[in-house]
Amino acid sequence: MVVDTRLKDAVAENDKIYGVIRGIEVNQSGLAHSITHPHTETQTTLLRQLLSNAGIEPHRVNLVEAHGTGTQAGDPSEMDSLRRVLAGNRTENNLLHVTSIKGNIGHPEAASGGASLAKVLLMLQHRRIPRQIGLETLNPRIPPLEPDHIVIDKTEVEWVPSHPGEPRVALLNNFGASGSNTALLVEEHIKQTAVASVPEDMFFVFGLSAKTPSAFEELRGKYINWLGGSTSASLSLADIAYTMTARRQIYRYRLAVSASSRKTLIEKLTSGTPVDVVPRRTDSLPANVVFVYSGNAGQYIGMGRRLYQDSTLFRACIDECEAILLEAGFAGMLQDIILGSGGLADLQEFEGYHAAIFALQYGLTQLWNSWGVKPTAVVGHSLGEYAALVTAGVITLKDALLLVAHRVRLMVQKCTANSTGMIAVNSNPEEILQLLRGFPELNIACYNSPVDCVVAGPLAQLEALKARLVGCKSVMLPMPFGCHSAAMTPLLDELTVLAGRISIQSPTIPVVSNVHGDVVLPGDASIFTADYFSRHEIVAWIELGPHTTCLPMLKANPAVTTETTIMSPSAASSLYRLFTTMICRGL
């Protein structure tokens, strides 16, 4: 079986490409004295038209898989047309090799073209030309081949390109009994090597699966032996990982591991325990995955550096966001925040963090999507709701990013830094409300879970509250402003005007609203009005953000299963380890 597809699609999907069809032509020997008799002139016209349309010079073709039926009329006619079109200006260093598979298998009639193509592709793969079996004496009606530097090989030879550095090109002839003539040009595909080298400690994900435990153990043993042997030594970990994940059907019994070296991979495959993933009601239904977008408090300088270096897709997303910011006149966040050069003043750093968190979440979303993990619902905590709404199609990337940038700039310009703040409290919000009766300027800014909340307001009152919080954990958040509180009042009107300029659409997937606490279903955009963003100031769960901040809130519900994307210095290791968990969860 031969699978043909567009070259750009095959390259994009990292398919193994055996050859590239550069051109195909068909004509009819209507001028021959008999419909079944070969016609040299018609074949010559066919070959010249094929080369012209493909833009291939005749001297570049140095192998012909001929129709070669071995008949007294057919072979001389075909060789004559090949000589006329391809033999000119050849030298001993660029011989024209002529072969035919019919010497091996006879004439398979309707399958003859497919058999010839399979042979050409195998010759391209091995870069060898097998000997033409069964040939003792050349047909006396064919003039000597040597003067035109044409050869029918009687021993196996290396297939050398017509010119050094150029891909090999073969021509395939296939003629029908009713006078139809077909010719095909097949060119070798030379895979473009990546310019950037892969870091030695870069992690990859590897998966094994089988229908039964015994089949899994058999497959595991084969892979371990193969990885430890010489036949796999020339293959990169990247290629092995791609084949073991993207190119394999996933079955019930699964094991997925991440590794950055062949030795570690073998060890993990040897020691790993497969999981039994019970099939869902129907594989056509997507797995229920919720993307959770965190807000402030988990950010740090250099939080996306390693992924920016390792992932082409993630890097493109960050660069896209950086370009939007710079074009709109905002300071970029790439060098100082994502890559971690630092050196910013406190408020500059605070301003840069907002855009960086959003860009980071956008990049992580695209990464998960590229791996086939797409959310069935989204929820954003505080600042994280902007990225959640982009994922749900409510607002565009550009509108959301610029709204984030304007919002934090208004905060810096119109609010007094370090006069208000926020404190996270590990306690029942109802109990905290009772305490706040003695602190009139404080309010609960975030109801995070039944046992977690955040209080915002003037710093002096926050310190006094903290002193009263005996017996429960409380942490002052590293924030120069008391967000989600009355401290944000000076920016609300202008933020509402800015939000009124953007286009708001109905969500394409359910969105859990921070403001209302409701689930907004696809097709309903009624709550996403211009003032929503100013009021916003007041299966598996995957958190997308700089660090784990939202999942402890979710874990307060014992029915919730949580996983996290941790953007630590070893971000790749954490991310790929999580990906292996998702595979074993049935995603």
Image (cartoon, rainbow, N blue to C red):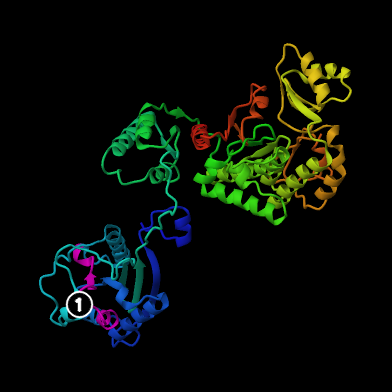
Image quadrant containing the N terminus: bottom left
| Residue holding disc 1 | 149
Q: Residue furthest left?
A: 136
Residue 85 in the image, given as x and y percentages of width and height? 30, 81
Name the residue nearer the viewer: 586 or 490: 490
Structural crowding at the residue carrying mark 1, measured as other residues with C-alpha within 10 Å and reported as few (<14), some (14–19) or many (≥20): some
Name the residue: 60% across, 48% down. 318
Residue 423: quarter of image: top right
Residue 87 in the image, given as x and y percentages of width and height? 25, 80
Magenta segment boundaries in residue numbering: 81-104
In this rendering, the answer to whether 502 lies above or below 277 is below
Q: Amino acid at mark 1?
A: His
Say whether residue 103 is magenta: yes
Q: Is residue 540 left or right of residue 111?
A: right
Say whether residue 16 is magenta: no
Residue 138 in the image, given as x and y percentages of width and height? 13, 76
Name the residue: 85% across, 41% down. 492
- Does residue 369 appear in this view? yes
Q: Is residue 561 left or right of residue 443?
A: left
Name the residue: 48% across, 58% down. 9
Secondary element at tag 1: loop
Q: Is residue 1 left or right of residue 459?
A: left
Residue 34: quarter of image: bottom left
In this rendering, the answer to whether 555 lies above or below 104 is above
- Does residue 175 appear in this view? no
Q: Is residue 103 left or right of residue 25?
A: left
